[in-house]
Image: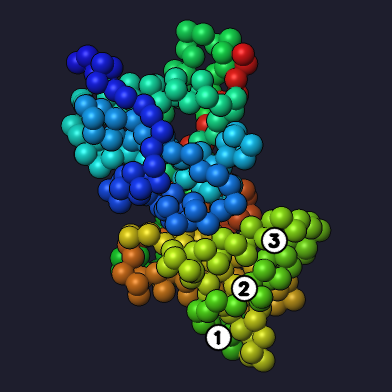
Amino acid sequence: MNSKTHIEVRRISSEEWGCLYETSLQASPFSHPDYIAGTQSSPEYWGVFYKKQIACGVVFMTQSDQPLQVGLWFTVYQSLLMARWLDESPPHTRGILIPRLIESLLQSVTAQYAKLHFSIHPSWRDMRPFQWLNYHKPEDGLASIKLHYTASLSLDGDITSGLNDSRRGDLKRAQKAGLTFSIGDDLASFVPLYIKTFSKHGHETSEETQRSVARTAEVAIRHNLGWLHFCRSRENLVIGAVLILFDKETAYYLIAGNDPEYRNTGAGTALLLESILEAKRRGLKYFDFIGVNSPQRGEFKLGFGGELKPYFSTLWTSLR
């Protein structure tokens, strides 16, 4: 199969990216055109065409004409999208064609930029093109590939059946404390709770981070890509909040904030469970906890019964 003669790589418009997004299995709120447009970075879209049909694409969020690092809180899974027709091709076609397509893409973008970072959706399995980048010319820079894990919970059946004893204990305390829950758009309460979450560990949040948190929540709510879920004490004080993003099938646990003075009420567990149940009520199929890559956070999230799923990020820096 001499596929290379039929491959074209070029910049594409946001409209072309949107069409690819609508059919791709790697589509998530983080790669939604409205979510991307709501950032303060300048997106640059690239498409790879096979026989004049778009096969895959990538978006780079740039400042000063160079891509920013992705894969952190607000941009996880934001880089590569594959067209549905390619994802559903026979294995013998995918196994040969995907490496050639991504090889062509990488040759084009590494000639354009000095550094590249990809955060890749869990459904993307073939990492060989990144392993093979500059295979015969390592002096031009090799890509480093990092393995990450998230937890994915199926929303079919009884959600509470997979809770471990620690999470069940939290729920009993929350019920005893008389906590209540609601959905709203109170950004003025959300951001201070986020700050308090980090201050209890002795970490300060920069003003830039605070603006990013507020902007992400505002964009998600305005474009119907997410919701804010709040927890209130018996005295009607807002003591916890989470930002949940969602697409056609999956909800994503993105940002949380909790008042440390109410930590022993089980508010964090109860609020997250309410968000999971809300996702189920909305007809979604899965709940992605967005990373279980540190001991304490990983144990907390896995206590809800999700299954481990690997995903990858890659970093390439030019040595030329």
The amino acid type of the residue labelled 3 equals Gln
| Residue at 51% from the left image edge and 43% from the top image edge | 43
The numbered mark at residue 180 is 1
Q: Secondary structure at mark 2?
A: helix
Q: Secondary structure at mark 3?
A: helix
Residue 121, x across and y down, in percent: 42, 43
In the figure, is residue 64 to the left or right of 309?
right
Q: Secondary structure at mark 1?
A: strand
The amino acid type of the residue labelled 1 equals Thr
Q: Which quarter of the rendered picture does the N terminus lie within?
A: top left
**Residue matched to label 2:** 187
Q: Quadrant of residue 240?
A: bottom right
Q: Residues within 10 Å of mark 1 (few under 14, many from 20)?
A: some
Of the residues under marks 2 and 1, which one precedes in the sequence?
1
**Vertical position of residue 269 compared to residue 5: above or below:** below
**Vertical position of residue 308 compared to residue 106: above or below:** below
Q: Residue furthest right?
A: 202
| Residue at 55% from the left image edge and 76% from the top image edge | 185
**Residue matched to label 3:** 210
**Vertical position of residue 237 compared to residue 57: above or below:** below
Residue 233, x across and y down, in percent: 64, 86
Residue 164 shows up from this direction? no
